[in-house]
Each structure stands twice: as C-alpha cells, then as structure tokens.
Amino acid sequence: MPAQTVVDEQLAQLNQNVPGTIFAMQPYRNAQTLTGEDGTTYTLTSLNPRVNSWFVLEIAPEGGRSRFAHFENGAPDTWDISLIDEDGPTLLIEGEGDSFACAPWDDGELEEAQTSALPFAPVCDWSLFVRNPVSGNRTTREAVAEFLRDNIVFGESIVNLIKGAFFEDAFMVSSEGEEEVEEIDGVELLGTALLDSTPNMRPYMGFELSGTDAGAMTAGSWYEVESSPGIYASVMQPSMIANEVFQVPGANGLDSIERRADVYLVAFDMARFEIGYELGTEHPRLGWSSRPSNRHGQGRGPDGFDQPDPLVRTGMLSPAFVERVAATFTGGFKRDHGAWRFGDYATFNYGHHYGFMQNGVLISRLWPNLATMYLTQDGEVDMRTWSEEDDALLSDLVFARQNGVPIIEDGVPGGRVTSWGGGNWSGDANATLRTLRGGACMRTVEGRQFLIYAYFSSATPSAMARTFQAYQCDYAMLLDMNSQEHTYMALYVHDEEGEEEMQWQHLVSGMAEADPDNGRIARFIGAPDNRDFFYLLRRQ
C-alpha cells in the first residue's frame, strides 16, 4: 500500500482540472520496479491495491520501446501479487497458505497469451488473466447507427429520424386484463405494489415463474423465478397505479399510450448476490461528447484522453465468474449521449460527462449532480446523486456508473423528471420522450436490500417515476433506451450436478437477437460485447 504522502500527491493529480492520463486518475496506485541483468526494466503497477484486481506490467528494454500487459487477478479475494528479485525480476503470487514465483515473460507464456486473441488469457497457472484487445459484438441495427454517427455528416440527425419514424412505441406491449381474481400472495418482504387495480395479466415475459395461474400474473405482485432463488418478477401498467402515488408532485401527467404500456420488473435479493460492472470494448467511450460546447481544450476528452491504454476493455465477464453468474443487464448511455447539450448542466463541469469506474479503477471522472450506481468494498450496492463530498468514498469503491439524474430520490420523483433538456432524458428528434426504456432502483425492506431492474415497453421519465414510486423504491435511475439490445436482460440457470450446459432466459424474447452466433452464445458471457453491462453472481 503506498504511503499516505504518496497517496496525497496522487490525489492531487486526480484533482487537477484535467488529470491527463489514466494513471493520474488512480490515486491509490502502487508501483514496483526492478531491473534485469540485461538492463530491461520491469514495473508492476497495482492500480488499486485496496481492490486488488487490476495490474499493469511495463517491460522496458534498455534503449528500446516499452510493451505493456494488463493483468486481472484470477481470484481477487485470494491472490496477492508483487514483484520480487529471484534470479531476476519475478512475480510472487501468494494466497491461502500457498505461494509461488512466476515470470511469464521468460518462457514465452506472456507472449503466447497476448497473441492468443482470447479476451482473457490465463498465465501463471490461472492465477492471472491477461486482458487482450478484442472487437465487441453488436447487432446489425447497432452497427448501422454507429456507422452513421461516426462517418456521415448529419449522421446523428439521420439516426434520430429513424428512431422517430420507426422506433417510437415499436416495442410497446399491452397485456390483456381479465376479471379481477383473488390476489396471489407476493414475496413476503417485497409485498405488492401500490396499485388501485390488480387484474390478472398475461405478459410476454420470457422467464419461467412459480405460482402463476396458468401463466397469468396478478398486477403488482411478485413471483419467484423458477430455478433462480432470490430472483422475483412482477408486471403492471401505469394506469393501475394508486391515486395516492399520483398525488405526490414532481412528475408530468401520463398519456393514454404509456398508461397502458406493460412494465416488467425483476427484483434481486442482494443478500444472495454480488454485483459487478464491466465496460464494453467500445462503449462508453472516453472522448468528448459532441453535445456540450463547454470544453477545456487540454486533451481529447474531459479527463484529457480518449483511449484507456495501457488498460484493455474486454466487454465480457471474466471466466473466473461464469460458474456463478445469475444475471446480466446492459449499462447506461454511450458517451456521445452521456452529456448535456443545453440547460444549466451543459454550462459547467464540461457538460457533465457521465463517469464510470471498474474494479476499483477510475476510468472517467465521477461528476457531482449525476445519478450513480456503485459498489463498495464491503459489498454494499447503492445509488445516490453524486456530490463533491462523495469523492471521499473513492477509496472504498469497487465500481460506479453514472447515468443522468435521478428518477426517484428519497422515495419521490427527482427534481428534473419533468425537464427534457434539464434531465438529458433523450428521445426522438422531435423531443418526444415516450420510448422503450430500462431503469433500476434500490429498495430496502426491513434492513434487506433489493435491486430492481425495470423494462418499460413505452414510457416517459414521468411514467418511470410513478412506477418506481408504486414499487416503493428509495432511489431510481435511467439506464439505456430505444431498443431491446440496449435494454437487454438475461438470467442464467446452472445445472447443480454440472452435467448440463448453462441455460439462459431473456426478459423479453426479442432480446435473443442480441446474442451472438444467431443466439447460440450468451451475450456478455460467451463473447465480447461493445456495450457495458452489470452482472450478478451468486454468493459463495
């Protein structure tokens, strides 16, 4: 662990107007350097020893060009990695009463790993993975939109025109209601949503559920997902929300379409799960968004750079976690949309580009005023509106992802829910806010935390706010929107005997189109992806 004076100096680098490099963003980094007999210098940097996950090795031949390797700890809770001199620079790998030395650059193992084309290539007896640069999967629709934005003059306008003409309400579904029946008991702790109407609904949900009436779900009730302990599903429409919810100020009235648009919700009992976050191979990017004009002129991005080098983004779950993965869902906006075009937030903090951190490594600065999902080193997942004072939490964070402003804060609609530009809610070219949206909220019941993911088949931020209110969320935020690959969610079922392959189910069947190889490979799990995502692991 670096001495406090060194930490203070490195914090000062981070707190500069523009940090300028990816290393300057890591105030808790610790570097060790040794020189071999041939004059080659080896520098191992632990980017955050408190999290003990990511390391960068620099090999600098005397008079030659440096080469780098980005290592990920194969078992973050187990191995301690350091650089020692044992007949030359060597890695010392220690954990659980075991230790061994490894110099993968001496026997060709490192070179073989880096040329393997594997996103995660094991070295040193699987104690470390080399993260290698790869191309991320994307759907045809995503690829076309990306090409237009990056290469065609007025490309963003064309994409918005396509969204407005073809995608508005394209995914909206409205389940038929039946006569009200005796309410099916929900999960004891979660209870039921605050609804005035609780008909039986037959949603187009892709999960297999326990306790339904021949597939019919009572609106606002929770149902266990089969073979997935601690995961629960619910369905409703905003028109069913109790009048007492609508009496709380802070949201706009709902139109006739979003009032009858299905909302699917999935709750995770966080006593059973760990949560993580992985950046996509490309998104969110690190350069400037095209939206704000308030730039500092000191680099290619708000933090002074637009590439993560020498860090590598794989867009894929680490192989160390596959056996425990229970769910994945996509993250937030791309960088180009993740900043303010107009309004007060466009005028300072360089437009408030949404920030993010992975494995204790700050990759894009966390800005005050933004809705932030984060995980601490003691395993607490939470959401809050980031403030300058919250920068004191950086030393305790494992991941953080910012996306816009709160939909719900302290149980009521956030202060910018009704402001299209002020909330950077996005929509189509005509400022129509109603579209397919994904969001998440936190709810605490009797000291127990639940993370709830919600899929809105057609909604404005106001419909999202009213829904999260009805489900008694403490805090809620928008994730991504406009298509099912951007609101993707899947659950994974593992054979307890280990005799069958992992099976996965999509929240909505159309999400399977985002899986690579015509749906035969699980997105985020079996192949790299260009988008960022969250994942949930069953606790050991």
Image: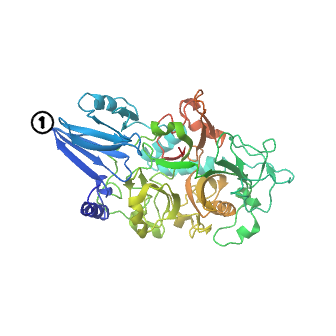
- Front-most of 327 and 279? 327
Looking at the image, which residue sits at the far front? 97
- Residue at (62% x, 46% y) in the render: 166
State whether residue 343 is above or below residue 527: below
Residue 310 appears in view: no
> Percent from the top left, x then y, of residue 522?
55, 35
- Front-most of 146 and 59? 59
Left or right of 314? Residue 68 is left
- Front-most of 236 and 125? 125
Question: Which residue is under mark 1?
Answer: 37
Colouring scheme applied when the structure was drawn: rainbow
Density class for disc 1 (Cα within 10 Å; few <14, some 14-19, many ≥20) is few
Tally of marks: 1
State whether residue 337 is above or below residue 38: below
State whether residue 474 is above or below residue 153: below
- Residue at (62% x, 48% y) in the render: 167
Left or right of 342? Residue 457 is right
State whether residue 235 is above or below residue 498: below
Residue 457 appears in view: yes
The amino acid pointed to by label 1 is: Glu
> Percent from the top left, x then y, of residue 175?
77, 48
> Percent from the top left, x then y, of residue 425?
55, 60
> Percent from the top left, x then y, of residue 407?
58, 63
Q: Secondary structure at mark 1?
A: loop
- Front-most of 294 and 364? 364
- Picture quadrant of residue 21: bottom left
> Quadrant where the N terminus lies?
bottom left
